[in-house]
Image (cartoon, grey):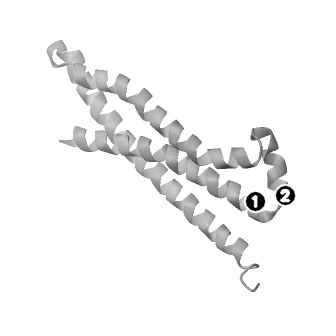
Amino acid sequence: MMNQPVAPYVRLVDAGLGAWRLSCHVAETLVAAQTVINSRLALIGAGLIDPRAMPWPEIERMITEKPATFARAGSGAMRKLAPASRRTSGWNALPGALADDVMTSFALLDRTIAASLAWWKPVGAKTRANARRLRR
């Protein structure tokens, strides 16, 4: 019985750490994205000066990788949210679920952060891989 009042505080700290991890993933992705954008603009700029130097494989990669990456990100996020939507009988019931009790709110917050992390992980991984590849 002594541990029960502590549980909401532990969940709150855990949610805070999850939000911090999420912000780190977002920041890493944004820095890598800027590196990719700068590298690709330089390659395309060189191709505009000399059409024989146009980086067609890189342009093709830019077009084809986005749908696949965002599809992976979206499916990962939905898998994390699915338990919450099943438990609360759909999106319309979420405000009622939040009002139920503090632990239900923390459970929804945990799933929301997990879904956000699941979305950002494949996007960030692809962006960082592109940045490493383009640095060479």
Check the image and report above or below for 46 versus 86: above
Q: In the rendering, at what x and y percent does residue 69 appear?
A: 42, 34
Residue type at mark 1?
Thr
Q: Quick one: label 1, few (<14), some, or many (20+) residues within 10 Å?
A: some
> Which residue lies most toward the top here?
51
Q: Quadrant of residue 136?
A: top left
Decide which of 113, 1 is in the foreground and name it.
Answer: 1
Residue in view at x 32 percent, y 35 percent: 38
Q: Secondary structure at mark 1?
A: helix
Residue 97 point in image, percent of width and height: 80, 52
What residue appears at the point 29 percent right and 30 percent down from the top-left corner? 40
Q: Is residue 129 shown left or right of residue 28?
A: left
Secondary element at tag 2: helix
Residue 104 tag number: 1
In the rendered image, the residue lying farthest to the bottom is 2
Q: Observer-nearest residue: 125 or 32?
A: 125
Amino acid identity at mark 2: Asp
Relative to 62, 30 lies left or right: right
Residue 102 against residue 120 in the figure, above or below: below
Query: Residue at position x 77%, y 47% from top?
Result: 88
Q: Provide the residue designation for mark 2.
A: 100
The percent coordinates of residue 100 (x first, y second) are: 84, 58
Seen at 14% across and 14% down, the residue is: 52
Q: Is residue 45 above or below residue 119?
A: above
What label does residue 8 carry, if any? none
Residues at marks 1 and 2 touching, judged by CB atoms closer than 8 Å: yes
